[in-house]
Image (cartoon, rainbow, N blue to C red):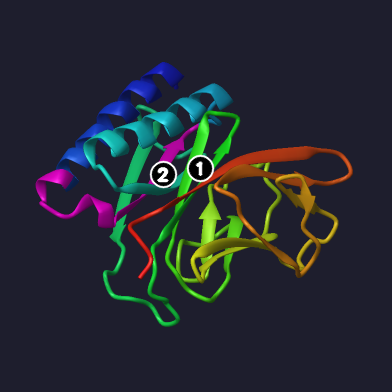
Amino acid sequence: MHERTVRNAFREAVESYCNQLSATGRDPRELRLSITVTTTGTLSRETVEWIHRAAHDHVRNLLPGARVDSLEFPVKAGVGEPGHRFGFRHSATPAREDHGREHGAAAVLTLCYDRDFVWPCRIGAAARWLALGRLPGQRPGPEALPLPEYAAWLPRGPLLLVRNHQGRLDFARSTQRPRYGIRVDGVDLPLGRSLVAAAAGEIEYRDPDSVTVLRYRVDWEGQHV
C-alpha cells in the first residue's frame, strides 16, 4: 500500500461524493458528513494530516456550509486490493427547534490545534450543557460535540462542557477525570465551575506530564432576538 496512492484516491473519492450531494439540490448548510478511511496498515501522521485537510478543503469548497463531523482511520488486514477503502455517510440537521432551545443566534465555536486541525462546532441557543471533547463511540447529538477520535493528544472523555445561553458562550469543567486541569485564557477552570468565553482565546488541558493547547474563536450567526 503506497500512501501517495491513498492520497490521490481519497482526493478523487471525496470530490466525487461532494459532487453527488451537490447534484441532489439539498441545502449544503444542513449536511453533516462522516468519513472512514480503511487501510491494510497504519497511515503515517503526515498522510492522516493531509487527508484531514483535503476532506475539509473539498467539503468547504464544493458544499459551502456543510461540515465534516467525523473522520476515522480504521486498520483492517482483510481490505482487498488496492489496500484501501473509503466510506462516506451524511445526515441532515433538523430544521425544527429541539426541546430547551432558546430564541437567539447560534454560536460557531471553532477549535484549532497546531494550525493543521480545525474543528468548527455549531451550538444552538439552549440552557443545557453539551459535552465537548474526544468521546469514543459517541455521535454528534443534542448532548454532545465529539471531536475526532484520532486526536489522541486530547484527553478522552467529557472533561469540558459548553453552552450558548442568554446571548453568551460559557465553558464549564465537568467533574470527570479530575487529574486533568483545564485553563481557559490563562484562568484555571475548577471542577463544577464555569466562565464566559472570549471572542477568541486558548484552552489548555494539563496533566502532570504534558500540556495540550487548543485555540478557539467564537462567531455568531445572525442577531439575537
Question: Could you tell me the amino acid type at mark 2?
Answer: Thr
Image point (31%, 52%), residue name = 89
Where is mark 2, residue-wise?
A: 36
Magenta part of the chain: 22-40
User: Hey, which quadrant is residue 94 in on the image?
Assistant: bottom left
Contact check, label 1 and label 2, Cβ < 8 Å: yes
Q: How many marks?
A: 2
Q: Nearer the viewer, residue 75 or 201?
A: 201
Question: Could you tell me the amino acid type at mark 1?
Answer: Pro
Q: What percent of the width, then of the height, locates residue 21?
A: 18, 47
Q: Establish if 215 lies above or below 27.
A: above
Q: Nearer the viewer, residue 123 or 15?
A: 123
Screen quadrant of the C terminus: bottom left
Give the spatial CA distance, label 1 vs label 2: 7 Å
169 with respect to 181 (left or right): left
Q: Is residue 110 magenta?
A: no
Q: What percent of the width, then of the height, locates residue 162?
A: 59, 62
214 with respect to 67 (left or right): right
Where is mark 1, residue-wise?
A: 74
Image point (85%, 56%), residue name = 179
Q: What percent of the width, then of the height, locates residue 50?
A: 45, 25
Q: Nearer the viewer, residue 219 or 178?
A: 219
Q: Residue furthest right?
A: 208
